[in-house]
Image (spheres, rainbow, N blue to C red):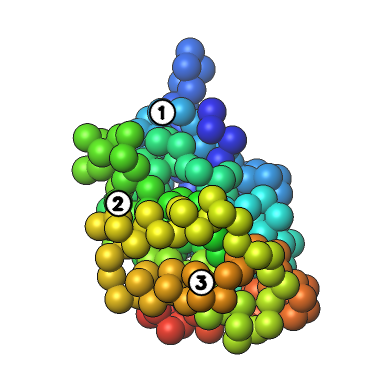
Amino acid sequence: ESGASLIGPLKLREETRGRGSRDIHCQTDVGESGYTIPNKPDTIEFLESNIDFVLAVETGGMRDRLVENGFDEDYNCLIVHLKGQPSRSTRRITKRLHDELDVPIAIFTDCDPWSYRIYGSVAYGSIKSAHLSEYLATPEAKYVGIRPQDIQEYDLPADPLSDSDVNALESELEDPRYQTAFWEEQIGLQLDIGKKSEQQALASRGLDFVTDTYLPDRLGEMDVL
């Protein structure tokens, strides 16, 4: 198993080796850690869904904050913990959620070049598994993660970019996946200000800022909410 998990208003049927199947509700039948995504997510059958959108989250700390604040319940949201760079099984189930349940996918990450690549792997596929992109990638996924403009607008705690960060950002400007007006503007701004920041930096605005203000506003702007 990948260690990645789901929590939210979704009931599914899981085929278990040698024990038949079991039905699981990803809110009421699991603890706060959620339902762990299995290595073979195509054995899962979606039974009942009250999901308005999927929020795929990079870090465990932010995922825990969202669950503690009841974000999944308040917004009929399925929270997927990506657990860093997402595994193939995580990307596969994310694609299935989008295609089969017809719900938007939003990716919520830190503000650094490595996190942008997490978004890229979900939306467009990774270089190593390019031959599986049709099976794993969700091009409709939207990036709602921390942006360089947020560092300025919200005066977020930030760290200076390292040399490897700068090299990675410059490399992304040459990557076809990031050659859009949005990414060119944000990556250019990040190189100009020379800073990066984490999801947890939003707590500097208050513990409930992310669930009460930041995500509802950003998701609303992007027509997810």
Look at discs 2 and 3 and give the one toward the viewer.
3
What residue appears at the point 68 percent right and 82 percent down from the top-left corner? 155
Q: Amino acid at mark 2?
A: Tyr
- Residue 83 image position (x, y, % from top left): 58, 44
Look at discs 1 and 3 and give the one toward the viewer.
3
Residues tagged 2 and 3 counted as in contact (Cβ below 8 A): no
Rendered position, 164 above or below 136 = below
Q: Disc 1 designates what residue?
A: 40
Q: CA distance from mark 2 to mark 3?
A: 22 Å
What residue appears at the point 30 percent right and 58 percent down from the top-left corner? 174
- Residue 109 image position (x, y, % from top left): 54, 60
Q: Disc 3 designates what residue?
A: 190
Q: CA distance from mark 1 to mark 2?
A: 21 Å
What residue appears at the point 40 percent right and 59 percent down from the top-left corner? 170
Q: Amino acid at mark 3?
A: Gln
What residue appears at the point 37 percent right and 57 percent down from the top-left corner? 172
Residues tagged 1 and 3 counted as in contact (Cβ below 8 A): no
Q: Amino acid at mark 1?
A: Lys
Residue at the far front in the pictured view: 163
Position of the N terminus, as image quadrant, is: top right
Of 176 and 21, nearer the camera is 176
Of 5 and 83, nearer the camera is 83
Q: Disc 2 designates what residue?
A: 124
- Asked which secondary structure carries label 1, the reply is loop
Q: Earlier in the sequence, mark 1 or mark 3?
A: 1
> Total number of numbered labels?
3
The answer to whether residue 154 is seen in the rendering is: yes
Q: Which quarter of the picture shows residue 182?
A: bottom left
Look at discs 1 and 2 and give the one toward the viewer.
2
- Asked which secondary structure carries label 3, the reply is helix
Q: Earlier in the sequence, mark 2 or mark 3?
A: 2
